Amino acid sequence: LLEKDPVATDLYATAVVPQVAQCRPSIYNRLRQELLQSQVNFERTDFILNDLQQVYSCFGLSCSDIGVVAKSYEGVNIPPCLATQADAPMALYRPTTDVHPIARIDLDVLQIRILTTLGSFSFAKLWYMYGRNSPRQRKSDNDPYYFYSLSEFAVASSRRNAEPYYSAFVSYHNDPNYSDLLIRNTLEGVGKWDSSKSVEQRSAVVTEAGAFLVLYLHLIAQINDAVNNCKGVDEDGEYDLTHPWDEVAALIIGSLEGMEEGGSSDIQDGQMIWGLGTRRGFQFQTLNAEGYAKVNSELEDLLFAGRGELDALRCDMLETTAEKIKRLTLIPLMQSVLKYAIQNEQQSANSGSSDVALGEVFAMAIIPIVQIYDPASASILEANMFVQPGGTLVGDGAQAVANALGSAANSIGISPRQLGSTPRADPNLLYGGSSSPAVRPLLLSSAVSLMSFVFIVL
């Protein structure tokens, strides 16, 4: 690139760019477009170099491994290499300790998604069992080099820190290792999502269960662990060498959102709660003025506040902040249940669509929690979102699911308005109507029709 040699650039790009697909979808797509699908434009060299720097850590490389350019090149402004620094921001949140290895557990999710989409469930099982991207913390270079894995987090004793959610999930499933059993069975082609189900469905179950059953409970445990750390309570935590609140940020945001405010604008990138919030913000019209999800904006403010409270040992304030974060992280999960209620309305349970599996997995992620606060709504979600052979999904209609979600949100302490709405379903309908401009005409039309009917009857 720097020598402006198109032949050599094409050669090395052909070797490197396909491998970037495992690292960050948006960067892979840009590099493929810039270097493989069109004639390279050397005027954009600095942008291309910046993208390459963003994926160094995915390959286990640092800026010092690559080195610096020994001479200057006319017309090229080589960007500073910041992405692999220990305090590199995650969606603007700048950690005080190096939690980027913790954040890179989202790369396991992404790569398992790629492998299972291709039908390579045996290799995906290796990723699930042993991990590949999130190195375990080591107190010295003599300690063995291992990776954290999704399977480890799925059965870890530290999940007990996630009360009351942990007990709710274990009680609901009657199995302390419920998520591990679901994922292993699906990878092996047995159980409910066996090899007779479509590849798309099995892939959806494995990846979303990994992200939003396993890692979500792991996140809640780390939030509670940070509060306990502030109070001087010694708990069975997973990490010892990094700031407890930085760990929380790493597990909310992940490594794939980039450094800018709001995170990545590409909805394919983020694999954690932050990325899920981005995806749902577009559909449910819950974006802020800057164009990213309101829930993420609120999470960002609370992450900054929580770190200051923990550092100042303002433990009561930190506990309040932690509770707010736990409530906010439920919003993208609830929105996801509603998304697939809309997609699956009156859908046959025998369908091979991934939407069928996604609806059930996201429902599994919230029903045990909803059951704590609003058992009636939990029953409605279960009846409509769970796949029963030969049955029909969302038989009561998407609005019934929306009403249950609105009721559950209200019981938990979330304003139903925060869930947003679509023209087909509005969780806020029973709580004052929709905040969505797209829904207001429908509600107005219904109101006019009702008043006309009453007038005629009278």
Image (cartoon, helix red, strand yellow):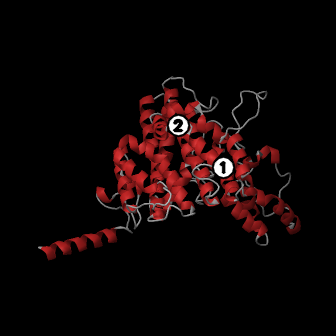
Label 2: how many Cα within 10 Å (few below 14, some 14–19, many 20+)? few
The one nearer the camera, 87 or 244, is 244
Query: Which quarter of the rendered picture does the N terminus lie within?
Result: bottom right
The one nearer the camera, 396 or 140, is 396
Query: Which quarter of the rendered picture does the C terminus lie within?
Result: bottom left
Mark found first going from the N terminus, 1 or 2 = 2
Residue 172 located left or right of residue 93: left
Residue 181 located left or right of residue 78: left
Find residue 94 and report its horizontal and vertical position in percent.
59, 43
> Which residue in the structure is indicated by mark 1?
187
How far separated are the C-alphas under marks 1 and 2? 19 Å
> Which residue in the structure is indicated by mark 2?
175
Residue 5 located left or right of residue 267: right
Find residue 422 and report its horizontal and vertical position in percent.
41, 65
Farthest bottom residue in view: 456
Work out whether residue 33 can be spotted: yes
